[in-house]
Amino acid sequence: MALVDAMIQTLTEELFTALMNQAQYALDFKSQFERMKTQLELMKAFLNDTEILKTKKEVLKLTMIQIRELIYEADDLLTDCRIRDEYQKDGRCSNFSASKLLFLYRTGKKLKDINLRIEKLENSLRVYLTPQLFSIQENVHQVTGFSCQDYDPANKVGLEHDARKIKEWIISKAKVLHRVGMIGMGGLGKSTIAQKLFNDEDVRSFFKNMIWLSVSQDFSEEQIMKSMLKQLYEEKTNRSVENLEQEKKSRSIERFEHERERRSLETLEQVEFVLNQEIAEKIKQLEDKKGKEISELPIEDKAQIMHKIHLLLEHMTCLIVMDDVWSIRIDWWNQLCSGLEKPTGKNSCIMITTRNEEVATNMGVEKSRIHRPSFLDDDESWSLFCKYAFYASKGICDDQQFENVGRDIVQKCGGLPLAIKTIAALLSQKRHSLVEWKNIYRGFHELTTRGQVSSVFACLQLSYNALPVHLKQLFLCFSIYPEDFEIPAEQLVLWWIGEGFIRGKDSKTAIELGYVYLTELVQRCLVEVVDQRGYDGKIYGCRMHDLVRDMTIVIAKDESFCSFEEGRQKLTSESRRLGFTSEMSTKSLKHCPKLRALLMMSSIQGLCCDDMESLSSLRVLDLSYFELATTAVQDLLKWIVSLKHLAYLNLSGVRGIGELPSSIKKLRNLQVFVLYGCTDLFMLHPFITHLKNMVVLDFRSCPLIYLPKGIGMLSQLQELSGFVMGRLSNEHCCHLLELQDLSQLRVLRMYLNAHSEIAENETEVLSKLKKLKVLELNAHYCKDHNTLMMLDDLYPPPSLQELYIGGYHCETLPAWINPEKLSNLQYISIQDSDINFFETSPQSVNGRLFTWNVEGLCFKKLQSLKLDWKNLEEDMPLLRYAEIAELEKQYQKDDHCFDFSPEKSLFFYRTGKKLKEISLQIEQMENSLRAV
């Protein structure tokens, strides 16, 4: 249902925008569009009310399929109206032509039909589900349990290093209140590590009070505090009982004699009996008092409960474990923690386990006190597996055949402790049947998602269920990628934009939001980072754990997001999205008229456009690095321009494209066009300027002579990469002056060559691009010193955050590259250039001192650079990341490297070889430490 909810939200937002902007197509069908918007909003509200039934009622699944189909139809219809509107703005469609009237008639009829079907579906759902919803809601109640977890020593395999590291943090006396966080996907062992520390003798002797709170997704603040009080009373009672027991043990003969005389008793045995009775009575009174105090706690007065907690913890050290936290109310949490601040010497600690990094940071955990348990390595995985699978033989496998199959099964678990333990426990019951073991290996996907060990799936699905609606459909996109595939982050984000999953919001563009959402999925431990930028962590590449991917496939199939069979993609007439691999046949594409996204995962030989003629619904087409014959390329382009709904087209690296045809103007819905690395592309047809919805144009590494005049009319353009500065005398060329009209531009990558020229009236163009954040000046194909000196006259963009310079064959940089002109600059990269000086020291202008605010820098292949490395940190106080390579002459001369403070992370690179050597050494050291 989450996918339908997201689809309804996206479509209603698009309808709202069209109506608000008074678009012509919206006015033509205003009443029908308003009716559709109202009904969709009502449908969404009703579906939210019936969320509790989604796993109980099969009728909902059938209804969801019908609703999805309706939304896809409505989206297609809305796109057709928008495209027709674009043609009409160009004067290509008369308001009174026969084709216009026919379009209005047909579209109006379709809209009425869709609205009628939506209304019928909603009525049917209400009649059928509302009575059952009320009956179920009457029996629904929230139960939240809190208990100290039992500790199983067998679970500690591979976790000793993690526990030792965190133990040093929590018993440190450096702070009055420590906050420590453990972050990782479900089943990784966070709670196990916390349990180990909670039961550690050193930890227990360090803290006077120990509180364990298991926090559910729908936790109650009152219940958490009552559980804290209960455990505090128990601790208090236990201490009193221990004191009484100690008193009992420490009795002396003199004490017995004194009591015998005082009580007029005859024997010492009578004295002991009486004293023991008194102690037993005191213990009973303590237990009764504890129970009474807990039962008399106010039900809703959170302030009183919190006050009691603070009183009980006054002058006492305490360890609080908040296990499996999903969300928290910050003001309540801060108020609770305020009572834990103690005088020096009374240290307390809060340990938090969560699947979401943002939760930990919101709860006050510093980045330096966040630990991410790693997956078990092969040896650790096998050791844990043996403890459960061969429990009867004390964890020893003495049969090579069973070991071979067992290791194959362990490999599929991907180092996830929960999966290893669960499947090993199942196999322990079949330890005499090698056939059964092999069957489990072959049916691993079905077993872990719907079979006997589906608890693994259930554990992981909690993370999916906790996702906001807008992240759920983005998450399902990962299902089409092959196992262990490194997914380019840029491709994901542009795909999301092409399908309309994300749109710009407030001051953020859709692209910026895409990276924010991807980072959220990483922070929630559902996606793993493979490659990222050093200074700010921007993600370049990512992947998904095999078991998380299996879960994604199951959900994507249930939601009809993609078509799967036995964990593999299957093409049917109902398929909507496809990651095409070399194992598939292009002939299978012949009967997929509903396909909306087609992404090639590898180069396919023998692609035939005839096989793809039915793919008329495509919104996303990624054919990166496709190998085609020249004649096939022409057929491909002819087919592509027929895809009127296409919004994202990626032809990066495709050879044989010499010039884009004039028919490119037909792609009126195109928003993202990527031609990166098309080494045969030398000319763009001027009709590309008709694509007014364009948001991203990428022509990097293409041998273009110039871009056609009129690019400045693409008013929605946010990223322009590969802009070639041509001759001023060329009337067909897009000159720098045109770019001043691109008010939405955030990224500009410019290429200079021997023909590049800048007019006097163009020097201030960049300064007028108020939203420009990223600027690249690529001069690799420009050796002329005079041409490069023209850059000195430019006025930089006021909001520039990232500056990239490459192939700059002058000794000094343009004068505007200084801390006064670039006060917002966060990152600077200079590569393969002849500069011999870079001014890092502060600059004084009219009595005001300007210092660099740069957080990251990259200097590579700058053989002539002279720089005072010793003063670098002082001159750039915010610098926390630097990437340096191939400055060998300077290093041999000065023999200096960076000396940054401990809290700053500096990465120093000379060569890729050295990096690999260092990584290998670190890995070997870690393995040695674990072995010890």
Image (cartoon, rainbow, N blue to C red):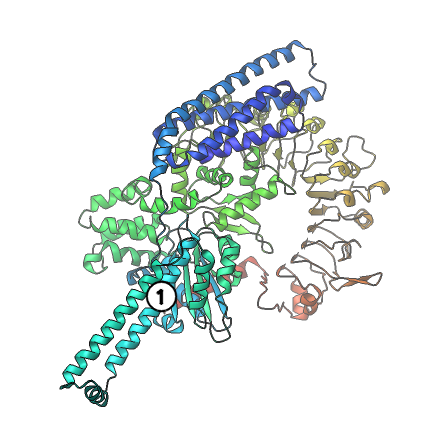
**Which residue is outermost to the top?**
98
Q: Quadrant of residue 400?
A: bottom left
The amino acid on which the numbered mark 1 sits, given as a three-letter code, is Tyr
> Percent x, y for residue 399?
21, 54
* Residue 720 vs residue 87, the one in the foreground: 87
Regarding residue 805, the answer to whether it shows in the image is yes
> Percent x, y for residue 707?
72, 34
| The N terminus lies in quadrant | top left
Give the labeled residue for mark 1. 233
> Percent x, y for residue 675?
62, 36
* Residue 316 vs residue 56, the one in the foreground: 316
> Percent x, y for residue 761?
85, 41
Q: Quadrant of residue 229?
A: bottom left
- Position of 390 with respect to 10 (left or right) is left
Q: Is residue 337 above or below residue 456?
A: below
Q: Is residue 87 above or below residue 507?
A: above
- Position of 758 with respect to 53 (left or right) is right
Kindly state the secondary structure of the residue where label 1 is placed.
helix
Q: Which residue is at 30% across, 77% downward?
A: 243
